[in-house]
Amino acid sequence: MAIQSKFDYKTHYNTVFQRFIKENHCPLLDFRKRAFEHFEQHGFPNKRVEDWRFTSCYEIAEKPFLCPKDSTTLTKKEIEPFLFENIDTIQLVLINGHYRPELSTQIDEQNISISSISKLCEAHDTRLEKIGTLVSAEENVFAALNASFFRDGFFIEVKQNAKIDKPIHIINIDADKDENSHNAVRHFISVAKNAELKIVESYHSHNSAPDALINVACELEVADGANVEYISIQQADETHHCFTNINANVAENGQLITNLLDFGSKLVRHTQNIVLDGANAHAKSCGTYIGHQRRQIDHYLYMDHAVGECSSEQLFRGVLTDKAKAVFRGRVVVRPDSQNTDASQSSKALLLSDDAQSHNLPQLEIYADDVRCSHGATVGELDKSSLFYLQSRGISEERAKQILTVAFAEEVVDHITIEPVRQKVYALIDQNLSKDLS
């Protein structure tokens, strides 16, 4: 059930793909061809497809997206606004989907290996065989497009028992001056037994033309006893579209925390698949979003309790005003014999206008007996009794609304363990809400 568009997007993408594979000789050619075949077979989904019934891809299907040029450069001063204050990070910069080593940190740590995907392709490195093992090209149409067209990203490996003290900060900047740029990036991150790693990936625009498509796939391998925190902060231009596929496998005693924070782009869709594959594995999926005008923010989450003795949490908060819209579809599956499972879901949206919409669709599929599973989803306005209480203490109505809205939005942000990053997110929330509440 593909979109029937006046613009023949399949022919357009076929032309772009044939040119792309001629220009980019790579051992991943068969992987790319299979991915593109999937795209050609399925096309962009219309609203009759269940997972897309609240989301229209029609505008994307009407645009002739192209691979961005590799010629754009920025100075260190120009990327300063995208950095965090008061923290030393391993800085990895991508501009228009291409690695920029001159703007990135030179790695001198022995316990971590970071390679650009483009360099691995040039060397025909055998590690590339892992690409696509966690984010399949057949997963959805944007995963297929990512697999077809990504040029760069990072292959990160952390050694056994290593604790990487500096967070990795991947800075993904769209600076293409041409309209309809398709910025496709892919990462594979492997954290070995009992190792620890914190990653922040941020998305930005710098004097870029409108209507870019940001398309990211991230594969996370969390080994026995490993501890990983992955934070995504999306601040792209509000004419852009942003799609991510973040998939992970968490082994015995492993822990994964993800936090998805959205403050930009007109259409955002996060797809996340996490498999808990060993006893005492734990995963926590968090998210905070602020939508105004006609922005749309979607979260499609799949938590697979493949074995027993595991726990998971899904915790999302959003604030919507004007004609903004959000979709939360959180699915938790507890497999047969996955006893002693503990899973919870909580999604709450605060609507600040009559035209804002939120669709909360929590799903629990339980095939075991000894489990503790819960879900909660609410959509509503500010609590009137709390508002009255603050006003009775001499606080103006406008200020009381701001206090309650900020507190609501910041509830999930407290789960970020990196203090300077948490403070930056607090500032982004205040900045966005002060604009919406003024």
Image: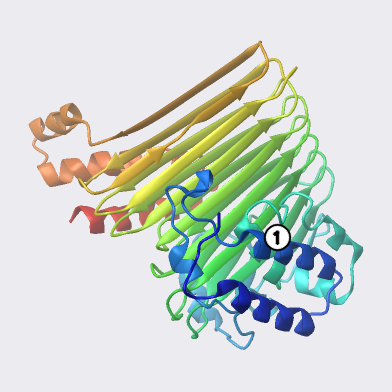
Percent x, y of residue 314: 53, 34
Report the side of 259 relative to 116 (left or right): left
Residue at x 53% of width, y 78% of height:
64
- Residue 354 horizontal/vertical position (percent): 20, 45
- Give the residue pinned by disc 1: 38
Instruction: Say above or below: 249 vs 296.
Output: above
Q: Specify the farthest residue to the top.
A: 370
Front residue of 185/102: it is: 185
Locate residue 58, reporting x and y percent. 45, 64
Q: Residue drawn at (80%, 63%), measured in percent from left and top? A: 31
Direction from residue 100 to residue 393 in the image, left or right: left
435, above or below 94, in the image:
above
Q: Which image quadrant: the N terminus?
A: bottom right
Q: Is residue 298 visible?
A: yes
Which amino acid does the dot numbered 1 rest on? His
Label 1 packing within 10 angstroms: few (<14), some (14-19), many (20+): many
Helix, strand or loop under label 1: helix
Exactly how many numbered labels are in the figure?
1
- Residue nearest the viewer, comparing 40 with 143: 40
The quarter in which the C terminus is drawn is: bottom left
Where's residue 267, x and y in %?
A: 43, 60
Q: Nearer the viewer, residue 432 or 33?
A: 33
Q: Quadrant of residue 211?
A: bottom left
Q: In this view of the protein, can residue 115 be seen by the observer?
A: no
